[in-house]
Image (cartoon, rainbow, N blue to C red):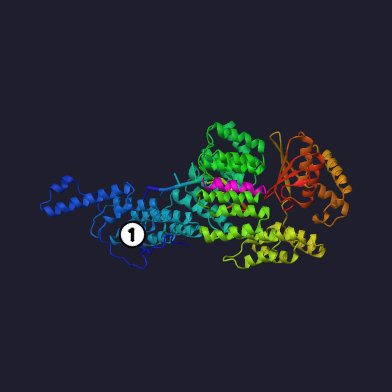
Amino acid sequence: MWVLHSPQIIQPPISPLQFNHRTASITAKPPSTTFICCFSTTSAAKSAVETTNKNSVIQLLCKKGNLKQALQLLSPESNLTQQTYELLILSCSLHKSFPDAFAVHRYLIANGFDEDPFLATKLIDMYTELECIEYARQVFDKIPRRTIYTWNAILRALTLAGYGVEALSIYREMNRIGMPCDRFTHTYALKACVVSESMTSLLKKGKEIHGQILRHGYETHVHIMTTLLDVYAKFGNVVHASYVFYAMADKNVVSWSAMIACYAKNERPLEALNLFHEMVYEISEFAPNSVTMVNVVQACAALGALEQGRVIHCYILRRNLNSILPVTSALMTMYARCGKLEIAQKIFDQMDNRDVVSWNTLISSYGIHGFGMKAVSIFKEMLNRGVKPTAISFVSVLGACSHAGLADVGKRLFNSMVEQHGISPSVEHYACLVDILGRANRLKEAAKVIQDMKMKPGPQVWGSLLGSCKIHCNVEFAERASAQLFKLEPTNAGNYVLLADIYAEARMWDEVKRVKQLLDTQGLEKVSGRSWIEVRRKIYSFTSVDELNPQIELIRALLAEFSGEMKQQGYIPQTQLVLYDLEEKEKERILLGHSEKLAVGFGLINTSKGETIRITKNLRLCQDCHTMTKFISRFTGREIMVRDINRIHHFHDGVCSCGDYP
DNA sequence: CTAGGGTTAG
């Protein structure tokens, strides 16, 4: 779990050493000068003076950041005060120094101070800061008299380290022994519910804690209620989150931001924007801050709402929030995801200071636009400038390689991750590598990567393989991947649909039927396709089934005309993509009603000639839509941009920027 | 002595 970064051998503070002697209770204040005058013998006075001096010298050194010198002054018999110990501990967290932290801890043990509730709390906090959870735990286990502070400290430590289940068992233990919980306890316990892996069982736990909070009369406490809201949001439970939000008597900018974040991150970007407008124009009691704006910008990005995004950008400039790094990164992503790569680049160029996230953002922006080599060269430029790459830098650059089909470059980068940068690949990185190889039709190699993984291949990894099988119509590997996926995430309808699509492509109709039955008997429904288009700052949403748009007949007629024209040029509608058992004509009709085609039709009717048509889609762009959009771009001389679930397609004069490498 | 919402990837 915890890996030591320096090669030095460091003596751990507790095990295997067994200190048991509690030599002293806490020394009160150091003797004052007047007190010293009363000593009869000079030696006693001298030692008292020395103790006083030693305490103040060590404290001063700690405050000045000179921890090393302070440590040199420690001697076995020095009689330090609680305050001095505290400063030593705080210095260690500040310097993030393991050897020093251990030395200080050992020193406390030797003097029996590690069992003092106040200092033990500080030690737990120190190990939390150093991300060294076992030692925090050992400190906690050794404390004979625990206060609410020590309990809260270990709860916080476990939660921050991602040990949700363990944190909740601490919470349970507190309740069992009758330790009264305070507002901090509840906040940490709530957060513990979302940091663990077994999400489903812990939602119930979160609701239990919700009940406890109400019983303790904390329903008006804005910190706790905001945490509660956020916990429901992180579980994707928008209904419960909004219930908490609307029931809150006092709200502040944080609770509003948390609710906007909840909508933005749970596929409700329109609600996020509406709530923001309400906050600003109707309530106007709380000024949005940078955190609010990050969430609002994300909502625009999710919608692909460029015009809305521009308005929000202006607002950010007016409020002087544009130089805050998270805001800038969110803005870059928004522009890139709306197809305005050049604006993302411009924002990056104009930044006074950049962090690794700014670089990662730029890399993935080029990646989703299909400029793989450019993304790789930005990555190298980042290294040249001495910016240390993070795990996400590699996800970004590997993703860029995958979009552009740069298999060997991607493989080399993957290997360099461990060899040159000391970052061990996570499941996500493996998923990227499998994607890179799979898309390049190196499925055997991809399967070998999965086989040799040092960890359990998660659904992301098998999903990458299955996705590649779709592109290359490989039934054999598709069956292997989907068998795993059905075990790992049995209720994800997308996997069944993907396999059925592959069978359909291979004209294996019996298998198509079998997979469809598998889907139906479990009562699963595939996520229906939806496309959005923004026209004059208004967002119009399309699905294949709704007939709400007043122009729907006009749109259908237009599409039928294109289809006829295309057929004359040799186009065959890809009706095998329609998995229902219908007549060919009916299949064609369904294909022509795909939400993305409707949105293109609507865009053609409602925008002017030189304008780019920008569409956002919630799933991957279907092949038939891809073919037809290419045709339309040439036939009408219009630029069309479609952002699907994982990249951007720019259609111009019959060609797509993805090079038909979706 | 401790506390709530946040940037990038999939």
Q: Is residue A545 in view from this perspective?
A: no
- The quarter of the picture where residue A139 lies is bottom left
Q: Main secondary structure of the magenta part?
A: helix
Chain letter for the residue marked with disc 1 in the picture: A
Q: Measuring from the top left, give residue A456's x and y in whole percent.
A: 59, 65
Asked if residue A561 is among those painted magenta in the image, a careful observer would answer: no
Seen in the picture, residue A647 relative to A201 is either above or below; the reply is above
Residue A77 % position (x, y): 23, 59
Taking the spot 22% from the left edge, 49% from the top edge, the residue there is: A53
Q: Secondary structure at mark 1?
A: helix
Q: Which residue is mark 1?
A: A103
Q: Is residue A538 left or right of residue A155?
A: right
Residue A523's place in the image compared with A37, above or below, is below
Q: Residue furthest left?
A: A40
> Relative to A254, does residue A626 appear above or below in the rendering?
below
Q: Nearer the viewer, residue A315 or A335?
A: A335
Question: In the rendered image, is residue A288 in sight?
Answer: yes
Left or right: residue A81 versus residue A558 is left
Which span of residues is magenta-colored? A355-370
Q: Amino acid at mark 1?
A: Ala
Left or right relative to A22: residue A606: right
User: In the image, what residue occupies the spot 18% across and 52% down?
Assistant: A48
Q: Furthest residue to the right?
A: A568
Asked if residue A209 is positioned above or below residue A245 in the image, the reply reads below
x and y, in percent, of residue A370 in the image: 67, 49
In the rendered image, residue A449, in percent from the top left (x then y), is placed at 63, 65
